[in-house]
């Protein structure tokens, strides 16, 4: 179950098609798709359908996410919940500050993961202080108690400044509740929205 508050279903499908079919996502957006790339889409369509990915671009409140998650779990149709991204999620309760609201939302997501026995992946933004330097937990925007509630915290950091399609990305495991932390490098292909091993 993918709750995306930032992109439309069409934008998400462009990303999925680019990734699975190895087609330049920019060409998909502007319609510059060649015949052989259409054939790739046809060949990969069954695999994409088998992803069984449920997209939600309308829910804006944590209460709505909780209700959907419980319904899908009751149908045995929920293995993982992804929220993209936390800053856009709200609650129907009233809080004196946004930080307290985000803290409550992150706590409820933690409890939801424990109750439904599923992993919940939450994407968050970093504040401007993180620009051009290796990020830390202090850079999490409206952090509240995110760093306390999360079992694992992973940052993606790119020290390259060029605009090339393929770049090396540092994947920084800043926190792991039951294991070691550290950094590894992955190759990121912007055109295909794809991560892969460097070699």
Image (tube, rainbow, N blue to C red):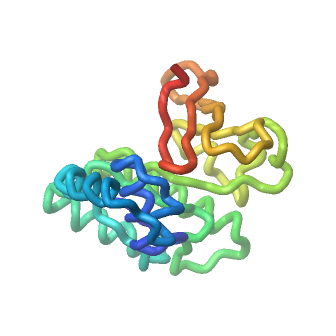
* Residue sitting nearer the eye, 150 or 164: 164
* Residue sitting nearer the eye, 25 or 78: 25
Check the image and name the residue furthest to the front. 35
Of the 4 image quadrants, the one containing the N terminus is bottom left
Q: Quadrant of residue 132?
A: top right
* Residue sitting nearer the eye, 123 or 184: 184
Q: Residue at x 42, y 54 (%)?
A: 18
- The image shows residue 36 at horizontal and vertical percentages of 31, 54
Relative vertical location of residue 192 with respect to residue 54 in this rendering, above or below: above
Q: Residue at x 61, y 32 (%)?
A: 171
Q: Residue at x 37, y 45 (%)?
A: 119
- The image shows residue 3 at horizontal and vertical percentages of 42, 65
- The image shows residue 179 at horizontal and vertical percentages of 51, 21
- The image shows residue 6 at horizontal and vertical percentages of 54, 70
Is 70 positioned to the left or the right of 26 in the image?
left
Is 24 positioned to the left or the right of 129 in the image?
left
Count of picture labels: 0
Q: Residue 174, can we see it?
A: no
Is 175 positioned to the left or the right of 179 in the image?
right
Q: Residue 185, can we see it?
A: yes
Q: Quadrant of residue 31?
A: bottom left
Relative vertical location of residue 196 with respect to residue 145 in this rendering, above or below: above
Is 105 positioned to the left or the right of 56 in the image?
right
Check the image and name the residue furthest to the left. 75
């Amino acid at each position: 179950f993918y709750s995306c508050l930032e992109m439309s279903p069409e934008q998400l499908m462009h990303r999925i098609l680019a990734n699975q079919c190895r087609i330049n996502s920019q060409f998909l957006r502007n319609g510059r798709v060649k015949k052989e790339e259409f054939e790739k889409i046809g060949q990969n369509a069954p695999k994409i359908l088998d992803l069984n990915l449920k997209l939600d671009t309308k829910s804006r409140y944590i209460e709505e996410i909780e209700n959907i998650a419980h319904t899908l779990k009751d149908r045995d149709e929920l293995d993982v919940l992804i929220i993209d991204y936390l800053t856009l999620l709200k609650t129907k309760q009233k809080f004196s500050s946004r930080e307290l609201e985000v803290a409550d939302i992150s706590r409820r997501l933690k409890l939801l993961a424990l109750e439904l026995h599923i992993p919940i992946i939450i994407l968050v933004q970093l504040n401007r202080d993180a620009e051009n330097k290796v990020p830390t937990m202090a850079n999490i925007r409206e952090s509240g108690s995110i760093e306390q509630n999360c079992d694992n915290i992973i940052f993606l950091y790119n020290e390259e400044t060029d605009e090339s399609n393929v770049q090396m990305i540092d994947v920084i495991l800043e926190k792991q509740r039951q294991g070691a932390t550290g950094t590894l490098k992955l190759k990121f292909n912007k055109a295909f929205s794809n991560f892969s091993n460097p070699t």
